[in-house]
Image (cartoon, rainbow, N blue to C red):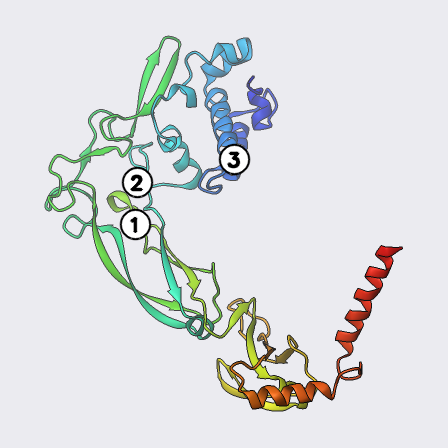
C-alpha cells in the first residue's frame, strides 16, 4: 500500500517551520498514543505514521531529500518502524514518549523506566454483600519494589553507573551513508545506566515476587462486572518506576431466593390454589427481613406483586429498586382418596359454567374456531 504524503499526515503546509511541525506531531501523538488507546490497532498505526513523518520532516537533511525525491529519497535509510528489526514498540518510540508526556530523562534522551503492569483480581460476593457493601481481605501475588536496593537493582552501598556505550542517553546513532539511524542502546536497553554489582535479592531487576494482603472496601450496590480500582497496588515498576494498578473484578453468586435485574429484585412465591381463589396473607422474605404480602381473591398464577423500595440502591446512585414477587399456584400432590373425592365433587359443581373459568372457556372457543376455519 502506498504511503501518504508526510505533510498531509501531519496536516501542515510544505513550508511549515520546525515549531509548526513539532506542534502538529504532538497533537496527533496525544490523540493516537497507544497508552491512550489500548488494544486499538488503527490508533497505533496512525501514531506510527505520524512519528515516521515527523522523523523525516524534523531532520533538515532528510526533509531536503524527501522534498526532492519523495519517499524514495528517505525509505532506504530512515530508521522507521520497518527498519527497527526486532525492537519493541516502546523501543522504537521511546524517545518520543518522554518528549510528549514527560519522563525522568537524564543526559538529554534516555528512555524512562516502564510503569508496572496493571493486575486483575476476581472477587466473588454473595448477593447480600453486594447489596449492603462489605470489606474483604484479599491476597494478591505481585511484583513489589525490592527493599534491599530500593528498586535501583544495584547492590546495597552501590548505585547504577552511566552507560559507557550511549553516554547515558539510552540511544545510539549509526551512520548509513547520507543518513543517520537512531536505535535503542543494546548495552543498557534504553535506560542509560548499567549495573556492575547487581542486588543479590532481586538480581538487578529492582523488584521481587511476593504475596501481599490488601483490604478492599466494596461499596453498597455493586453488581456483576463492576470494577474497583486500587491505585498503585499492581505490579511494581522497573528500577523505581511507578507501580501499576489493581482492578478488582466483581461477580455475584447466584442466590437461592432472589434474582437481581438492575436495581430490582425478583422472587417466586408458591401459594395454594385455595389461597389464590379465596385470598389471604403470607410472609415473604426481603433482604431487610420479612414483610406481609396480601393476596387478593381470584389471583392467577404468574401475577407480579411489587414491594416498593425493597430492592437495591445502585452504587451509581438513583432511587432504590423494588422487590417483585411472582406468585405460582402449586398443584397439590400425594392426595389420599378422600381428598381426590372432594376435588371431583368440587369439579362437578363448576362443570358447564364459564363464570368460574373464563380463560379456559375463551381458549376452548378459540380452538374450536381455529379448526372450523381449517375445514373451510
Please name the residue shown 50% across and 10% down the image: 72
- Which residue corresponds to mark 3? 43
Name the one closer to the observer, 323 or 37: 323
* Residue 142: % across, % down: 26, 52
Q: With 186 as the anchor, is 178 left or right in this view? A: right
Q: Is mark 3 on a helix, strand or loop?
A: helix
The disc, 1 or 3, on the residue closer to the chain's N-terminal end is 3
Local packing at callout 3 (Cα closer than 10 Å; few below 14, some 14-19, many 20+) is some
Please count the marks in the image.
3
Q: Is mark 1 on a helix, strand or loop?
A: loop
What is the residue that sits farthest to the right in this orientation? 376
Foreground mark, 3 or 2? 3
Q: In which quarter of the image is the N terminus?
A: top right
Query: In the figure, is residue 49 to the left or right of 361?
Result: left
Nearest to the observer: residue 342 or residue 110: 342
Image quadrant where residue 304 sits: bottom right
Say which residue label 1 marks: 235
Name the residue rendered at 63%, 79% in the picture. Answer: 306
Question: Where residue 113 is drawn, which disc sits there?
Answer: 2
Amino acid at each position: 500500500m502506498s504511503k501518504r504524503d508526510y505533510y498531509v499526515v501531519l496536516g501542515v503546509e510544505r513550508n511549515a517551520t520546525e515549531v509548526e511541525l513539532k506542534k502538529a506531531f504532538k497533537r496527533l501523538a496525544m490523540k493516537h498514543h497507544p497508552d491512550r488507546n489500548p488494544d486499538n490497532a488503527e490508533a497505533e498505526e496512525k501514531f506510527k505514521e505520524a512519528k515516521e513523518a515527523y522523523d523525516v520532516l524534523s531532520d533538515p537533511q532528510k526533509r531536503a531529500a524527501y522534498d526532492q525525491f519523495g519517499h524514495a529519497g528517505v525509505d532506504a535509510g530512515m530508521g522507521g518502524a520497518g527498519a527497527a528489526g526486532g525492537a519493541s514498540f516502546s523501543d522504537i518510540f521511546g524517545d518520543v514518549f518522554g518528549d510528549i508526556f514527560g519522563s525522568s530523562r537524564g543526559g538529554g534522551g534516555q528512555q524512562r523506566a516502564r510503569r508496572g503492569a496493571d493486575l486483575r483480581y476476581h472477587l466473588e460476593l454473595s448477593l447480600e454483600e453486594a447489596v449492603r457493601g462489605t470489606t474483604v481481605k484479599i491476597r494478591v501475588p505481585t511484583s513489589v519494589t525490592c527493599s534491599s536496593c530500593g528498586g535501583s537493582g544495584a547492590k546495597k552501598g552501590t548505585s547504577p553507573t552511566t552507560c559507557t556505550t550511549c553516554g547515558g542517553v539510552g540511544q545510539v546513532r549509526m551512520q548509513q551513508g547520507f543518513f543517520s539511524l537512531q536505535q535503542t542502546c543494546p548495552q543498557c536497553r534504553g535506560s542509560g545506566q548499567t549495573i556492575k554489582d547487581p542486588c543479590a535479592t532481586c538480581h538487578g531487576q529492582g523488584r521481587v515476587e511476593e504475596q501481599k494482603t490488601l483490604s478492599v472496601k466494596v461499596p453498597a450496590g455493586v453488581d456483576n462486572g463492576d470494577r474497583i480500582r486500587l491505585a498503585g497496588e499492581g505490579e511494581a515498576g522497573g528500577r523505581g518506576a511507578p507501580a501499576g494498578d489493581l482492578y478488582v473484578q466483581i461477580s455475584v453468586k447466584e442466590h437461592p431466593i432472589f434474582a437481581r435485574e438492575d436495581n430490582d429484585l425478583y422472587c417466586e412465591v408458591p401459594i395454594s390454589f385455595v389461597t389464590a381463589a379465596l385470598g389471604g396473607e403470607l410472609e415473604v422474605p426481603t433482604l431487610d427481613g420479612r414483610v406481609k404480602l396480601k393476596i387478593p381473591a381470584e389471583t392467577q398464577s404468574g401475577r407480579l406483586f411489587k414491594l416498593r423500595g425493597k430492592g437495591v440502591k445502585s452504587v451509581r446512585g438513583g432511587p432504590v429498586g423494588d422487590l417483585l414477587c411472582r406468585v405460582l399456584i402449586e398443584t397439590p400432590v400425594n392426595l389420599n382418596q378422600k381428598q381426590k373425592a372432594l376435588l371431583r365433587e368440587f369439579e362437578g359443581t363448576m362443570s358447564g359454567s364459564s363464570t368460574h373459568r373464563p380463560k379456559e372457556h375463551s381458549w376452548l372457543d378459540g380452538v374450536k374456531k381455529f379448526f372450523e376455519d381449517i375445514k373451510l
